[in-house]
Amino acid sequence: MSNEEKLTKVGINWYPGHMARTKREIKEKLNLIDVIYEVVDSRMPVSSKIKDIDNIVKDKKKIIIFSKYDLCDKEETNKFIKYYQDMKYTVITSELNNTNIKKIILETNNLMNDYFMKQKEKGLQRRNIRVLVIGVPNAGKSTLINKIAGKAKAGVASKPGFTKQLNWIKIDKNIELLDSPGILWPKIESQEEAKILASLSSIKEEVVNSYEISNFILRIMFKLYKGNLKERYDITSLSEDLVDEYNQIAKKRGALKRGGLPDYEKVSKIIISDLQSGKLGKITFDRLK
Ligand SMILES: Nc1nc2c(ncn2[C@@H]2O[C@H](COP(=O)(O)OP(=O)(O)OP(=O)(O)O)[C@@H](O)[C@H]2O)c(=O)[nH]1
Ligand SMILES: [Mg+2]
């Protein structure tokens, strides 16, 4: 099986197996939920988006959280933010050390205002708003939950759910957040998207070939962020097979085997980790069409 085929298989294989179960679990939880926080990775707002989300969450209110905003190319990512805002979605950015939790809470209340007004007209008591965080693997769901929960400094309450105990964290006087997120797999629509996801670590390394990812990173960086590639690796052009470039990075970074031969496996790992840790600069791989 070629690497190309392996990547295609990721999209096809993962989807039915894991997805069928998690989708079912999320559907069960959904009956208890009023608002969804959908987390997307700011570096790939489309590739990390669950395309069929609205079929899954149906009529739930939604806030889109752009996570890892500190790692992205803001100029490009802001185009996506505007795109979603124009579609009347509430969008909030989140960084490792800077998440506007107050705004998240305010917007959550705003989304439910009309509903509670109607309830009041019917003479019904106001109840707590219940929130679920969802997103693809590695999107930053747990980080967000921890931040919101930490900020709220609230205890954890357990309530019987459908099939198991669900833990609700009180994040505001009338908002409760489910402490376990819904993990979904995005429907992969192209090879390019699969590779973007893989390079930014939403597809586990065991499933895809690491050279396929590091080669892709060099190529897309050369296409979109040439300057960063020059700055980090002193690379100003790319050869067809990328061997020269691997040799150069090996030398520059001391990724050598005994006897001084380049250690290509190590170079591949260096490229992937440099990208993911932001050492190749602030990047956004998706482009608004
Ligand atoms: N720089 C930066 N890193 C982040 C941010 N949010 C999350 N991360 C990092 O991204 C990685 C994944 O974050 P998690 O919160 O575990 O993601 P998750 O969606 O819960 O992942 P799964 O549980 O595997 O589905 C971790 O290494 C986080 O530290 C952010 O806003 N900025
Ligand atoms: Mg998690």
Image: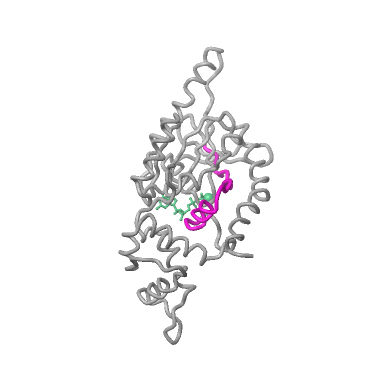
Q: Position of residue 83 (x, y in %)?
A: 42, 35
Q: How many marks?
A: 0
Please give the name of the residue rendered at 50% of the width and 47% of the height, measured from the top-left corner.
Answer: 48
Q: Choose between 130 and 230: the one closer to the eye.
A: 230
User: Over which residues does the magenta segment extend?
Assistant: 177-201
* Quadrant assignment for the C terminus: top left
The image quarter containing residue 150 is: top left
Q: Position of residue 128 (x, y in %)?
A: 52, 28
Please give the name of the residue rendered at 39% of the width and 57% of the height, measured from the top-left corner.
Answer: 223
Q: Is residue 62 left or right of residue 11?
A: left
Q: Is residue 173 magenta?
A: no
Q: Position of residue 178 (x, y in %)?
A: 55, 39
Q: Choose between 14 and 163: the one closer to the eye.
A: 14
Furthest residue in direction front, as rendered: 240
* Quadrant assignment for the N terminus: bottom right
The image quarter containing residue 235 is: bottom left
